[in-house]
Image: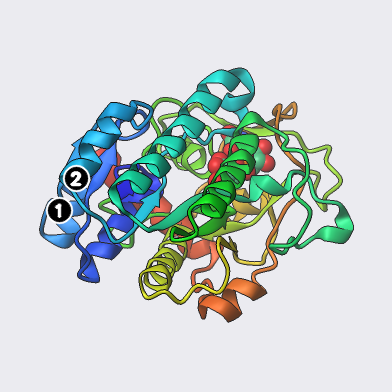
Amino acid sequence: MVTGGLGYIGSHTVVELMQKGYQVHIIDNLSNSSLDVLEGIQRITGEIPPYDIFDLTEKDKVFQFFSKNSFDAIIHFAAFKAVGESVEKPLLYYRNNLNSLINILDGALNFGTKNLVFSSSCTVYGQPDDKDLPVTENSPIMPANSPYGNTKQISEEIITDFIKSNPQFSAILLRYFNPIGAHPTGFIGELPRGVPNNLVPFITQTAIGLRQELSVFGDDYNTPDGTPIRDYIDIMDLVDAHIVAVERLTKGQTKKNPEVFNLGTGRGLTVLEVIKTFEKVTEQKLNYKIVGRREGDIEKVWADTSFANKELGWKTKRTLADSLETAWKWEQYYQKNA
Ligand code: WQD
């Protein structure tokens, strides 16, 4: 069961699961995706997986769904995830992200699903102190800088407490850093509804002429070029880790409950470095201007990935240039076929 399976990370994970022979069932409410994504999934895998369109905040719909199906594992992606937007609309984020998780856990409890891979986030670390960078899974959980980050912190606590009262239930929490890039075929990619919140889709939409210019939110941070630092991880590397996590759960190989892994590259890059690399990869100038800081942004975070590398036998393979290439390829394909 893949919630948010028509979304950016969800759709790429669905494709990989299908190609590895898993039976996948997608749940999505189309709040930040579209049914067109099914076409891309079919182009890549040759088939359209079963899918149900409903809102996971509606408990009776969730229970109805669970009563008709049984699952070896749930991968729960479905959530709102724009840091800036969550500052403006906190209740939307708390209601959606927390109620859907609670309904998923309640459904799993009542219908016997025992394994959960949860889409968590590096935002649980808030703004780490310099001495705590790069962050490990044991770095302090700092006060969240945004309601979005707080929903991820609270979600991890909900899952941990749920496991205490239902030890037969196992979970792996995957803390993503900044997912970027697209499937190598270019048939699926990041498809934000409306104006993109995230950096890379805004870059590609500016480069293709959909957006006038990219606003760079602040260059007065305490970083080499003044712009914030993030750990940009290729979507396909991120997906690989999900396959490993599902196998680890369904084969009962977890050593703790829940297990927590940082999914990043271990490399911190500034916004301007991403822009410069994009210009090099696409051999075109990007139109951008430096503006004020964005509310909710932290200054710098990147991952210490040694635990995931060792314990999961997983590490990232793609470079920033690889990811920007596939993101650009996807943007061009999408605009031509939209
Ligand atoms: C990255 C950098 C912006 C847009 C993401 C996900 C979130 C979580 C953490 C997984 C920041 C700058 C952006 C723009 C800009 N990941 N920027 N102009 O805020 O790090 O959050 O990673 O759970 O879900 O959203 O990502 O891409 O919005 O911003 O200058 O138009 O790019 O200030 O420094 P963020 P982002």
Residue at x 52% of width, y 63% of height: 321
Q: Position of residue 67 (x, y in %)?
A: 20, 42
Q: Which residue is mark 1?
A: 42
Q: Position of residue 101 (x, y in %)?
A: 45, 39
Q: Which residue is mark 2?
A: 38
Q: Residue furthest left?
A: 47
Tell whether circle 2 marks a residue whose Cβ is less than 8 angstroms from ligand 1.
no
Q: Position of residue 71 (x, y in %)?
A: 26, 56
Ligand 1 quadrant?
A: top right
As rendered, which of 266 and 121 lies closer to the eye? Answer: 121
Residue at x 28% of width, y 56% of height: 14
Residue at x 40% of width, y 30% of height: 210
Is residue 159 rendered to the left or right of residue 39?
Answer: right
| Amino acid type of the residue that numbered disc 2 sits on in the rendered structure | Leu
Which quarter of the rendering shows the C terminus? top left
Q: Secondary structure at mark 1?
A: helix
Q: Is residue 134 visible?
A: yes
Q: How many marks?
A: 2
Q: Is residue 331 visible?
A: no
Q: Separation of disc 2 and disc 1 at Cα?
A: 6 Å
Quadrant housing residue 168: bottom left
Q: Is residue 187 above or below residue 85?
A: below
Contact flag, marks 2 and 1 (Cβ < 8 Å): yes
Quadrant housing residue 138: bottom right
As rendered, which of 92 and 167 lies closer to the eye? Answer: 167
Q: Is residue 30 above or below residue 177?
A: above
Residue at x 54% of width, y 75% of height: 315
